[in-house]
Image: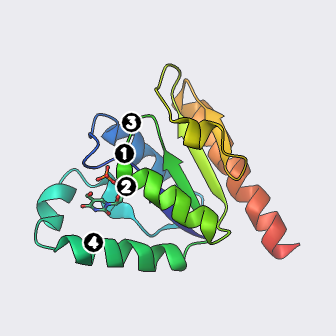
Amino acid sequence: MKVFFSGSIRGGRELLSVYQHLCSFIVSKGHEVLTEHVADPQVEKVESAMTEQEIFARDMALLEHSSCLIAEVSIPSTGVGYEICSAVQRNIPVLCLYRPGANVSAMVLGNPYVALWQYSTLEGLDTKVLAFLISLQAEIWG
Ligand SMILES: O=c1[nH]c(=O)n([C@H]2C[C@H](O)[C@@H](COP(=O)(O)O)O2)cc1CO
C-alpha cells in the first residue's frame, strides 16, 4: 500500500528518530512511504529549494495517491493537523500515534474519524502500525 507518513517539521524535529524508525518499519513490511522526506534529517535544507506553494502542492498530490495516512502527533504541528483533516475529508483512513504525556489536541483525541494509539515503546508502535496496515489490506482485498 501507499502510505502517507505525517510528522512535524517546522513544529519541531525532536522525534526525528521515531519518524525514521516508522518509515523504515513500514517499508520493511512491503509498503511504500510516499513522504519519506518527512524522516530526512536534511528536509528543511532540501525543501528550502522549493517554494511554499510547491511543497503544499506536492504533499496534497501525494495524499491523493495514498491508501492511508499514519501520523505521529506528539509534537503539535500545523502541517500534520492539516494533513490529517485533509485525509479525513477524502475518506482516507488515518492512524494517529502519540507518546504518553504528549499534549495532543482535542481535534485529534476527540476525533471519531481517526484511529488513535498511545505507545511507550517502539515495539508497541510497530505492533499497532502493522495491525492497522493488515486491517486495511483485509478491507481492500476482502
Ligand atoms: O518543508 C515541508 N515539507 C513538508 O512536506 N511538510 C509537510 C509534511 C509534514 O507531515 C508536515 C509538517 O508540518 P509542519 O512543518 O507544520 O510541522 O507538513 C511541511 C514542510 C514545512 O512546513
Q: Name the foreground residue: 38 vs 23.
A: 38
Position of 42 compared to 136: left or right?
A: left
Q: Kindly identify the residue that appears in the image at 32 percent across and 72 percent down.
A: 56
Question: Separation of disc 2 and disc 4 at Cα?
Answer: 11 Å
Asked if the residue at label 1 sits under 8 Å from ligand 1, the reply is yes
**Is there CB contact under 8 Å for labels 3 and 1?**
yes
Q: From the top left corner, tell me how far across and down residue 73 is, in percent.
A: 47, 41
**Element class at badge 3:** loop
Q: Badge 3: few (under 14), some or many (20 or more) residues near its Cα, within 10 Å?
A: many
Residue 79's disc is 2
Q: Kindly identify the residue that appears in the image at 68 percent across and 57 percent down.
A: 133
Above/below status of 4 relative to 41: below
Asked if the residue at label 4 sits under 8 Å from ligand 1, the reply is yes
What residue is shown with label 3? 75
Is there any visible trace of residue 28 in the rendered image? no
Where is the N terminus found, in terms of image quarters?
bottom right
What residue is shown with label 4? 55
**Is there CB contact under 8 Å for labels 2 and 3?**
no
Question: Separation of disc 3 and disc 1 at Cα?
Answer: 6 Å
**Is there CB contact under 8 Å for labels 2 and 4?**
no
Asked if the residue at label 3 sits under 8 Å from ligand 1, the reply is yes
Position of 113 compared to 71: left or right?
A: right
Q: Amino acid at mark 3?
A: Ile
Q: Residue furthest top?
A: 101
Is there any visible trace of residue 12 in the rendered image? yes
